[in-house]
Amino acid sequence: MAADAEKLLIIGGSGFIGRNVVARLAQADGLNRRPLAATYCRDASFVDWAAQWPHVTPIRFDGTTGPGAFSDYAACLYMAGNANHTWALDHPADDLRMNAGALLNALADFRGRLVYLSSGAVYYGLAGQVSPATPVQPAFPYAISKYASELYVRQLAHVGRLTGFTIVRLYYAYGPYEPARRLIPTLIRRLAFQDEERFTLNGDGETLMAPLYVDDVAAALCAALDGPSLNRAVDLCPPRPLALRALVEQAAAALDRPLRLSQRPTAEEAIRFWSSGDEARRLFGPAQPVSLAEGIGRYARWLRENARQE
């Protein structure tokens, strides 16, 4: 390990995207392995999983219960918090506590540079093409808590408690370690593993989705962590969105499975906005994201292999 290697901190390392980022960082440094700490809250299996890399230190931390002690880390990638949009509708106070409140606790004595994983949800209520220059005023609990978190990041930098920051507004990631309740793993299991043909869409099927395979997401976040602070937000998404119906149909085609669609009402607000994501690809890569068909194929193979190991 390099004697002067900076210490990296991943808040939310045990989560879906967190595990992919930790694995990428742990494997990418070669002989110059940087000390890497990654937090977990309830998922104690993360300790054994992280043990495959001696320079990765799991730290149990719950930002909703009190401040962290992370003053000796040079850089932090923050990915913790609630990510369930529908749950936030019924639990707005808890969602705010888990997102904005926990963020402030985690950064209580941190003084390095920060990459904060935010969400394209901050654009909820808008229609058409958007960008970080677009004024936002979301009226949706999850979007409110993520945008409030962004504002707190800016405030911490303004008063000198961060040396710099980059806010990454992620639209939709899918891939290994994703919660089973989400759209794409549910679709793969039902169509490919359970031989079902019928699938029910929430809403009218026209809400816009911008799926990125998690390998591309992890690569971009690692590049943001290793690069200079932008001190502003960027959108992380593919060049073109897909309507939900089209996404499901293309996924079924990639799995070579028949599909019959139905619809049901949903309380979640439909997405009518999109972003090009050009700047994030230019800054962080990759220039050519993994296609949906390739990503679905990779993910299905991982799910099948993972099922064998359980």
Image: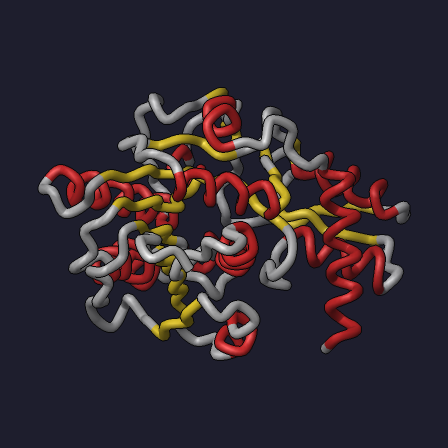
Q: Is 215 placed left or right of 303 in the picture? A: left
Name the residue furthest front: 3
* Residue at the image point whose x is 16% and y is 45% from the top: 156
Q: Is 134 placed left or right of 280 in the picture? A: left
Out of 189 and 144, give the one closest to the viewer: 189
Q: Quadrant of the C terminus?
A: bottom right
Q: For residue 33, which quarter of the picture?
A: bottom left
Q: For residue 125, which quarter of the picture?
A: top left
Q: Position of residue 89 (x, y in %)?
A: 41, 55
How many marks the image carries: the answer is 0
Q: Position of residue 24 (x, y in %)?
A: 55, 53
Does residue 286 appear anywhere in the picture? yes
Q: Position of residue 87 (x, y in %)?
A: 45, 60
Out of 58 and 174, give the one closest to the viewer: 58
Out of 93 and 309, give the one closest to the viewer: 309
Q: Quadrant of the N terminus?
A: bottom left
Does residue 90 appear anywhere in the picture? no
As drawn, 190 above or below 295 = below
* Residue at the image point whose x is 27% and y is 45% from the top: 113
Q: Is 115 placed left or right of 280 in the picture? A: left
* Residue at the image point whose x is 40% and y is 31% from the top: 234
Name the residue furthest left: 159
As drawn, 284 above or below 129 = below
Q: Specify the color scheme.
A: secondary structure
* Residue at the image point whose x is 49% and y is 34% from the top: 236
Q: Position of residue 211 (x, y in %)?
A: 61, 39
As drawn, 102 above or below 146 = below
